[in-house]
Amino acid sequence: MNDLTMSIKKLRGPILILGASGFVGANLFRMLKNVRDDVYGTATRLPAWRLPEFSLLQTDLSSESHTKKLLDEIQPQTIFDCATYGGYSFENNAERIYRTNLFSKVQLIHALMQRNIHCYVHAGSSSEYGYDAAAPDEDRMTKPNSHYAVTKSAIANLLYYSGKHQAFPCANLRLYAVYGPWEDRARLIPTLVAQGLEKRLPPFVKAETSRDFVFVDDVCKAFIQTANHLTADHYGESFNIGTGKKTSIRELADIARDLYHVNEQPKFASMDSRSWDTDEWYANPEKAKKILHWSAETKLAEGLAKTTAWLNSLENKDQYLHVSKQNTRDTQYSISAIIACYKDAQAIPIMTERLVNVFEKCNIDYEIILVNDGSPDNSEEVIRDLSANNPHVMGITHARNFGSQSAFRSGMQIASKNACVLLDGDLQDPPELIEEFIQKWREGYDVVYGIRVKREAPFLMQMAYKLFYRLFDWFSSVPIPHDAGDFSLMSKRVVSWLLTCNEKDLFLRGLRAYVGFKQTGVEYVRPERMFGVTTNNFFKNVGWAKKGIFSFSKTPLNMVTAAGVVLTAFTVLLAIYQIGMHILFPQSAPKGITTLMLLIMFFGSFTIFSISLLGEYIAKIFEEVKARPHYIRKHLIRN
């Protein structure tokens, strides 16, 4: 048993690696997983191209509930936090940098401090030093010069406070220029290796610019050594993780020319530096050596050779060479398409194909969640086949039919993208309209709904639908868009607020209006079902009308109250009139029973109608107080 294996076995488990789909996280996950089984990794998106053979946990660390659920399920003792955003020049979304690197970390650290963990090791960055990055010691004041550096420096300070003043077992590792297998293809070293194999050199920055290139295996060992050797005296402190050797770009080019037998001369200063780059950027790793018993062991030439051997061993080498975060789909405007399926087995493959075409055309990150709401046909088998052939497709099977509203909620609960699109599975909601939804979303709208300007349906049915939406809007306590069904795009914050509405008798198009935010509509013609016949009928439509009106309006009760007041006043006036007529004109009292019967029938009918309205509201109260789940999932289907 070698020293590394022994060190890994000494780690207190279970072990949780946050950001396991990233460059450092993936290498650390593989290193630990080769030795022990109690290692868990997270990713914001699946599948993780760096770890295709492993099962990761898909979670959103910016969500407090997701974080709590993750920690409750795993109960980790050792946490390696490699989740980050902004380290690449093309990762320039400031809002996401702060959300990922700062706000979610504050939330995570607070949650961990409530638990009895062994150690939390955070992947910091040498960028924290800013332009003052030439062999600084860890006590030197940081001078961040980018949003990314600001967030990393802020967390380093939080960890220092938490470790020193609240005895939280944590450390911050300031990583230098990490390189090795699975690094993003857009970075310098992978580009150098790929070009070197073709006997060429990539463009370089200025020749005398220096970096501290540290091999990723050595960095992974630093995480392990930190968890094993960190003592209470050093809780919360930062450690420089680098070789301590400054390597100029000229020296790097010379090493590459020798390794790959390249004859051409390097072209220095032929590409621009990043805005936060400095001429000299290398580590002083003495503190890590003394306290963590760690030092980098891999020389640059050796690390390049290992990276080259790894690349040559890949079965999908060409795919890796074309994979880069820089060239992947737009993740800021990513979408979870949620399809409620009931008796739609024939339509599901066509729906999925059309959705994929739309998302590919828009070049956005996406997932398709097909919710089989207890369908009696072979919908589940169809969904399994689709998910097996497309990693973007997943399925949910409910234990029985709970209705489309519960199906949509079930999908929204597990959606991981930045917006949700709701569609019925019968192809009456055209997926191609989503392109217009996305455009409106980019313009700043949080909700974009489809407006059915016309239906391919009988004339009387069309008029009935139009009448319903106008009555619903008139009755409702919030403005309701006319002719707008469930087909809509909702941003992540709208969805999160919708999910806080725990009422059991869901009416999502009403809740969507209730939540508010900036909303707009896109007009379309709604076609008939492509396959089969509609599962709606007159009585179901009446049920929908009742659901909408009684969920969002007290107007019927107010109308009954108003009618009761008017009729009571009328009765009092009538009584006064009759008494006066008896006194003044005794022979003028009306004869016959017809008038009496009509009045009795009128008030009797009105009483029954009033009681029935009260009954509808009481029935809704009855449903709510039972507090039964919105749905029961039978299966989750992925790949």
Image (cartoon, rainbow, N blue to C red):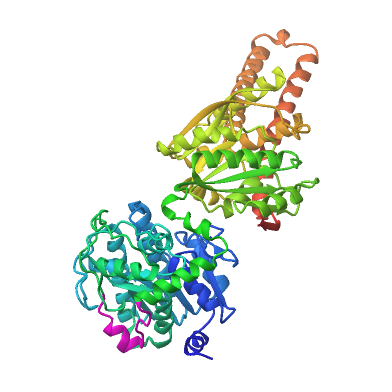
Residue 193: which quarter of the image?
A: bottom left
545 and 253: which one is in front? 253
* Viewer-side residue, 84 vs 482: 84
Residue 80 or 566: which is nearer the viewer? 80
Segment colored magenta:
283-299
Taking the image as shown, residue 111 lies to the left or right of residue 258, namely right
Question: Which quarter shows the C terminus?
Answer: bottom right
Q: Residue 619, how many percent across, how many down? A: 69, 44
> Is 133 included in the stretch rendered in magenta?
no
- Please say if 345 is above or below 576: below
User: Residue 335 at x, y = what percent?
Assistant: 52, 46
| Position of residue 229 measured from the top left corner of the image (x, y, whole percent) | 39, 88
Q: From this viewpoint, is residue 477 visible? A: no
User: Which quadrant holds the N terminus?
Assistant: bottom right
Image coordinates of residue 183 in percent, x first then y, are 43, 64
Please state if 109 lies on the left or on the right of 502 as rendered: left
Image: 599 above or below 370: above
Residue 457 relative to residue 115: left or right: right
Q: Answer above or below: position of 320 versus 27.
A: above
User: How many marks are shown on the rendered structure?
Assistant: 0
The answer to which image quadrant residue 465 occupies is top right
Residue 414 is at least partly visible in this image: yes
